[in-house]
Amino acid sequence: MTNADLFLESMVHTQHKVFGMKLKPLTLFHTSILEKYNNPIFTGGTVTKSALEFAVIVCSSNNISEIQGKLKSKVLHLWFMLFDHSKSLTDFQAYIDDYLALPDTYAGSKEDDTSVSNIAHPYALLMMANIMKHTNYQMHDLFYKLPIGALYWLNSSIAYLESGDTDIITDKDKVAINLLSHQLNPQISKPQQPS
């Protein structure tokens, strides 16, 4: 997928429903809660029905009190039993894919060793601080309202405008990487040029 395609995918979304519940645009608020509670949808591992139910409750809510209310609802847990886990997991994955169309980046490519794993502050916080520094966005809007893919793209664009440098892999680089992969392993189907 080209960078233009990835960017558009991160900005243009369809309405998603899982277990019959409308999901909110995936924001840093939602992903932070799922990561905090080690939900396997974000941390990896086998996704149980209860992990999927928790993720749907989180991603269909606007704030903590909504999440707490839904978690206490016995009716909601009975409601979940009406749905097929496998289909619901597929639907939730489509939701994640829709919002997490992030730019491909070179991991840890900076000479000054500022890769994400070597930074003392959480990367999401650095992104929000950078965006707030250059725009009129407030922290609340970035955390609760801006879809997470848009957050990554906006931050990358600001970094590029500031320094002319970015960790985003260009479409031209993607083609070169794919060609090299094909040369190293001929069994891989020959890559196509991005449109």
Image: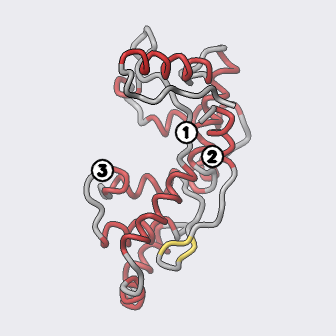
Label 3, label 2: how far apart the Cα atoms are: 22 Å
Q: Residues within 10 Å of mark 2 (few under 14, many from 20)?
A: many
User: Which of the pair 112/16 is nearer the observer?
Assistant: 16
Q: Residue at x 51, y 58 (%)?
A: 94
Q: Residues within 10 Å of mark 3 (few under 14, many from 20)?
A: few
Q: CA–CA distance between discs 1 and 2?
A: 7 Å
Q: Point out residue 174 in the picture as x, y percentages from the top left corner.
A: 54, 23
Q: Earlier in the sequence, mark 3 or mark 2?
A: 2
Q: Identify which residue is drawn at 35% across, 23% down.
A: 118
Question: Circles 3 and 1: CB distance less than 8 Å?
Answer: no
Q: Mark 3 is on which residue type? A: Gly
Q: Position of residue 184 (x, y in %)?
A: 37, 16
State left or right for residue 33 relative to residue 9.
left
Q: Residues within 10 Å of mark 1 (few under 14, many from 20)?
A: many
Amino acid on which disc 1 is placed? Leu
Closer to the chain start, of discs 1 and 2, is 2
Residue 1 to residue 146: above or below: above
Per the image, label 2 sits on a secondary structure element best described as helix
Picture coordinates of residue 114, whole percent (x, y): 42, 18
Residue under circle 2?
10
- Labelled disc at residue 102: 1
Q: Are marks 1 and 2 in contact (CB under 8 Å)?
A: yes
Residue ID at (53%, 16%): 176
